[in-house]
């Protein structure tokens, strides 16, 4: 790898409400807007540091970890895959599709470091039974700007897809300006609304501007790269068994208890295609496996509950009843993957480095619950109905992650 610098981990202080609610009006105060802007992000990893860290992990793994450039962002930054394990079950884990949602990247690097260099019985079992493909920081342009949307104009979309020259810009195109960000002079897209369950879909003028309850278009290089990785894995293994997308949310409480949420999880992103509500997705009914998604969520929840009476136990179920086929999770769920959402709570300045460490550890713990469950086969024995026993987030919303 070229032009890399050494990674320096330092402390992080992140303000209250890292993410505010995601509004469906992309021109208004956008999703991911902080409550205030008085925070530092130096404790989180930059793209250049990510490149250096991945190179280090690969070099010290003695061939256990394979790092590749899967594609490039709109501004030409590398989007990486890091693969560890040789098993038949495939887990695709991605982080930072929104550039200000950063704990998942740190968690994935820690997992890659452990599985690539540790010779414990647990690590060897995982490497033998599963293939893990991690995509840390899939939206590096947004990560460098510490914002939700990528860095891309509608004119660039039309240049790539001339058939859209007379179309309105897609609904997820950010052009607003407020006291936090200036998308007006530096626009971009919410990449996590640019997915389509038809992996071969090509943008059609009649499908624009669209809305949150319709599929996306693969007009951004970042979503195209994730799609290509997913499609290649399907071709190689037959399916991607598990897809986990690592996000952040605002600060919420657990319904009924008032306890602050550390992490919310979910396995529901579209209505079940076998139900009347999901009939519009009926062509994907034979592939969709909502029960497996619930089992995976329970595996993550149980692993976190085993941490004992601590904030790690404050895990809630993300609001249900979503219909978001344009998200990676919704699209890949329709392609047969057991899909899981992680939504880490926003961090405040009073949390400091200690809170950052706790939240990264929570993500790692939940991911290991899933990884170990798939590797051992125990996840397939979980009663999916236990998903409904996970406490809900005390949150009223009509928008998605």
Image: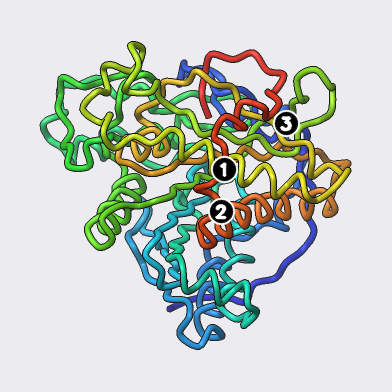
Separation of residues labelled 3 and 1 (CA atoms):
34 Å
> Can you give x and y, in whole percent of width and height, for residue 382 in the image?
57, 43
The mark closer to the camera, 3 or 1, is 1
* CB under 8 Å between discs 3 and 1: no
Measure the alpha-carbon separation of dots 3 and 2. 36 Å
Q: Secondary structure at mark 3?
A: loop
| Vertical placement of residue 148 versus 253, above or below | below
**Vertical position of residue 298 compared to residue 213: above or below:** below
Taking 59 as reference, is 101 left or right? right
Residue under numbered circle 1: 382
Q: Earlier in the sequence, mark 3 or mark 1?
A: 3
Residue 238 placement, left or right of 326: left
Q: Secondary structure at mark 1?
A: loop
Using a 10 Å C-alpha cutoff, classify the residue at mark 3 as few (fewer than 14 neighbours), some (14 to 19) or many (20 or more): many
Q: Which residue is denoted by mark 3 in the rendering?
A: 17
Q: Which mark is residue 378?
A: 2
**Res 120 label:** none
Q: Are marks 2 and 1 in contact (CB under 8 Å)?
A: yes
């Amino acid at each position: 790898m070229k032009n890399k610098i050494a990674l320096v981990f330092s402390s992080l202080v992140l303000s209250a409400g890292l993410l505010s609610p995601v509004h469906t009006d992309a021109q208004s105060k956008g999703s991911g807007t902080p409550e205030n802007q008085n925070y530092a992000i130096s404790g989180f990893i930059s793209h250049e540091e990510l490149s250096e860290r991945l190179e280090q992990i690969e070099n010290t793994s003695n061939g256990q970890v394979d790092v590749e450039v899967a594609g490039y962002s709109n501004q030409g930054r590398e989007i990486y895959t890091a693969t560890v394990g040789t098993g038949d079950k495939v887990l695709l884990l991605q982080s930072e599709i929104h550039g200000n949602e950063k704990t998942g990247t740190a968690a994935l690097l820690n997992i890659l470091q452990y599985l690539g260099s540790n010779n414990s019985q647990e690590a060897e079992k995982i490497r033998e039974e599963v293939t893990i493909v991690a995509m840390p920081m899939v939206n590096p342009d947004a990560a460098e700007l510490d914002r939700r949307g990528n860095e891309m104009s509608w004119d660039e979309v039309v240049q790539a897809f001339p058939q859209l020259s007379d179309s309105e810009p897609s609904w997820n195109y950010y052009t607003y300006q407020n006291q936090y960000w200036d998308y007006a002079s530096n626009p971009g897209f919410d990449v996590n609304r640019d997915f389509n369950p038809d992996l071969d879909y090509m943008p059609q003028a009649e499908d624009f501007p669209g809305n949150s309850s319709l599929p996306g278009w693969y007009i951004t290089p970042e979503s195209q790269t994730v799609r290509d990785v997913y499609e290649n894995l399907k071709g190689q293994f037959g399916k991607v068994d598990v897809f986990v997308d690592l996000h952040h949310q605002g600060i919420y409480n657990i319904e009924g208890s008032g306890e602050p949420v550390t992490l919310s999880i979910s396995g529901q992103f579209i209505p079940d295609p076998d139900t009347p509500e999901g009939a519009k997705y009926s062509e994907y009914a034979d592939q969709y496996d909502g029960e497996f998604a619930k089992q995976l969520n329970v595996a993550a929840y149980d692993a976190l509950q085993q941490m004992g009476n601590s904030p790690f136990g404050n895990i809630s179920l993300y609001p249900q009843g979503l219909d978001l086929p344009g998200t990676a999770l919704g699209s890949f769920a329709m392609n047969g993957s057991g899909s899981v959402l992680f939504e880490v709570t926003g961090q405040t300045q009073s949390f400091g480095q200690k809170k950052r460490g706790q939240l990264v550890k929570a993500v790692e713990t939940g991911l290991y619950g899933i990884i170990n469950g798939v590797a051992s086969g125990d996840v397939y024995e979980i009663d999916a109905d236990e998903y409904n026993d996970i406490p809900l987030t005390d949150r009223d919303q009509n928008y998605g992650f």
